[in-house]
Image: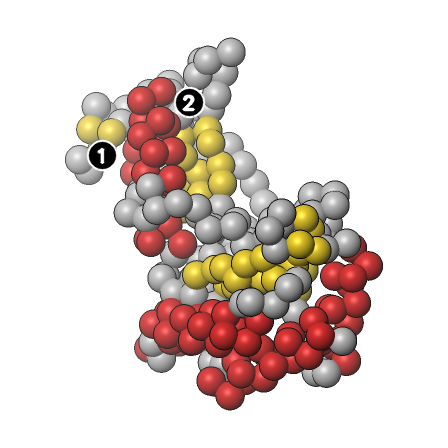
Amino acid sequence: EGAEPVAAFICEPITSGGGVLVPPENYLKEVRKVCDDHGVLLILDEVVSGFGRTGAMFGHHHYGVTPDIVTLAKGLTSGYQPLGACVVSDRVFANFHDCPDAVHQGKVASTLPPRLAHLRSINTYGGHPVACAVGLRNIEIVEREGLVERAAEMGAFLKRTLEEAIGAHKHVGEVRGRGLLVGVELVADRDTKTPLDDDACGAIVRRCADAGVVVGRNASTVPGLGNVLILAPPFVIEEHECARVAETLRAALDA
């Protein structure tokens, strides 16, 4: 049907709940180019990958692209208060303010009539002062304590430790991820990458929990493909805790 009816393209920089899918290095740049060629907005969902999870402040920083709109939550307050946010570029924002001038502070002016050139949206809890205060302090702590850099460092250590411990296991198809967002793909056959069945995957998760290690899983994303364990530990995780995660997973796979 062509580009005419397409307003925007939305994706995660790194797919999280879908199985920790890390795109090729040039993927987002090509997406950005296609969007630019056809006048389509690029919206990046940074709810999971934002604020350091992948070892960069935002997931798209790994790929050198600038989105038009970014959605944020989770790491914005580290879960201490519920808060979500939507950030837009100057070009997008210019269409949502009353500005009859051709130029507003050097930015593109609104193309809408003045009576329509404002953001027609309302949210009962929008701009909640307590949640916003927590978000600001959380970002301050993340920056002050170098937690983004720590996520990159410990994420590399965790991934390397997992590869050494279970990378060659008969039921592990791949260990992948970026920063402290790591996925372990469980397979019935390493050559064909046939997914390990649901019951077996569930049993591995339960064995880990029984041993005191909580791991996630993409169980409800795609029917029949809930075979990826998702590891997203706190940024303050220590090396010995990474080793424990790897040892626990190896024991759960061998059981």
Q: Closest to the observer: 25 or 192?
A: 192
Q: Closest to the observer: 28 or 244?
A: 244
Instruction: Indicate which label's residue lies in the foreground, 1 or 2.
Output: 1
Q: Label 1: which residue? A: 107
Give me the disc on residue 115.
2
Q: Are marks 1 and 2 in contact (CB under 8 Å)?
A: no
Give SS at disc 1. strand
Give SS at disc 2. loop
Image location (x, y in percent) of residue 20: 54, 54
Report the side of 242 relative to 18 (left or right): left
Q: Quadrant of the C terminus?
A: bottom right
Find residue 66 and report its image quarter. Answer: top left
Query: In the image, is residue 9 above or below residue 124?
Result: above
Give, as a three-letter code, the residue at label 1: Lys
Q: Closest to the observer: 170 or 145?
A: 170
Image location (x, y in percent) of residue 109: 27, 27
Report the side of 210 relative to 58 (left or right): right
Image location (x, y in percent) of residue 241: 54, 84
How far apart in space, not on screen, are marks 1 and 2 (Cα)? 19 Å
Q: Closest to the observer: 69 or 215?
A: 215
Asked if residue 85 shows in the view, the reply is no
Give, as a three-letter code, the residue at label 2: Arg
Residue at (43, 65) in percent of width and height? 179
Count up the numbered dots: 2
